[in-house]
Amino acid sequence: MRFTPRALAGNVNVSSGHPLTEFAWLLGGLLTLLLAVYLAFWLLSELFAPRVPVAVEVWAGQHLLGQLAPKSNPTLQQRLDGLLAVSPADSPLHRYNFSVSVMNNKEINALALPGGHIVVFSGLLKEIRSENELAMVLAHELGHYARRDHLRGMGRGLGFTLLMATLFGQDSRAASIASGFFFSLEMRYSQQQESAADTFGLQLLAARYGHAGGASDFFERLADKADSRYDYLLASHPHPQARIASLQRMIADAGYRLAETLPLQGEQLLIDNHQAGTKP
């Protein structure tokens, strides 16, 4: 008697679907999970960012500061301290022990790290033309601290990093690339946050110098330039013309007077020293 095997009608170990279809479902499920976790971290960061203890910020900021390795500078620190001295007594800024340092990088940018660490890129310093412009840059960064904008983005970035390390392994290349990309996105503020920081910065600038001269000078020059170094500012900040109009409107509404700006003094030596060592 000849034996003829029959096809299996059903088996839990044999899939009836196409492998590519199953892969698509798995990939879709993973992406859905990542999206859900991101939204959860977004909600948590919005709820808890104002409540994060400064001590926790300081710990996170020291870690990031060690990776960037910027150089401290007494001249910039003096300018920053002058702004803090005129901030209101009930300002949330007084919770921090602020420091400012310089990082060799041609990008036109500055960072507000957790814990009160401000990092100014040498590329930005090279574009500064007056003490008042520099004060506006620092006062703008202080505005992010007053609203704790930096913690909202960093909270989401930290949560996503932990998730990627869990899924792919702490030392995996996928986790490193994905988390690095995510952090680069989350370090950017929304345009609403940038506008609010401009408002705060203008108020502090006027309190420090008695007028609002220099508040929009940098943006007026920026509006006339086409340079790849400005790509970050143009992508993550309100357009220069919009910022100029907004600042001029705020100056008029507040009745701030305009006066001549102060020339750079010790800052000019700082800029010259960093120009030769700026990264290409």
Image (tube, rainbow, N blue to C red):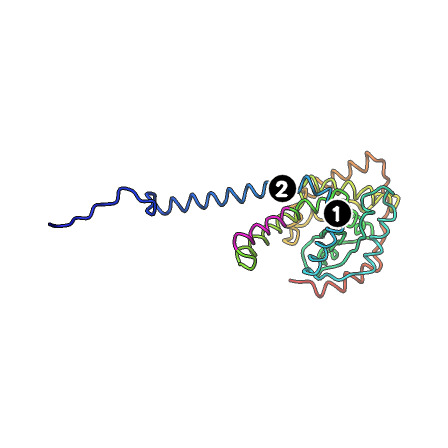
Q: Mark 1 points at which residue?
A: 53
- Is 163 one of the magenta-colored residues? yes
Which residue type carries mark 1?
Pro
Report whether 47 appears left or right of 178.
right
Would you say the magenta stretch is mainly helix, strand or loop? helix
Q: Nearer the viewer, residue 18 or 228?
A: 18
Give the mark nearer the N terminus: 2 vs 1.
2
Q: Which of 76 and 257 is in front in this view?
A: 76
Q: Name the residue under label 2.
A: 42
Q: What x and y, as percent, mark residue 270?
A: 79, 61
Q: Nearer the viewer, residue 3 or 139?
A: 3
Residues drawn in magenta: 156-168
Which residue type carries mark 2?
Trp
Could you tell me which quadrant the C terminus lies in?
bottom right
User: In the picture shown, does residue 177 fall above or below 9?
Assistant: below
Q: Which residue is drawn at 82% across and 56% down?
A: 77
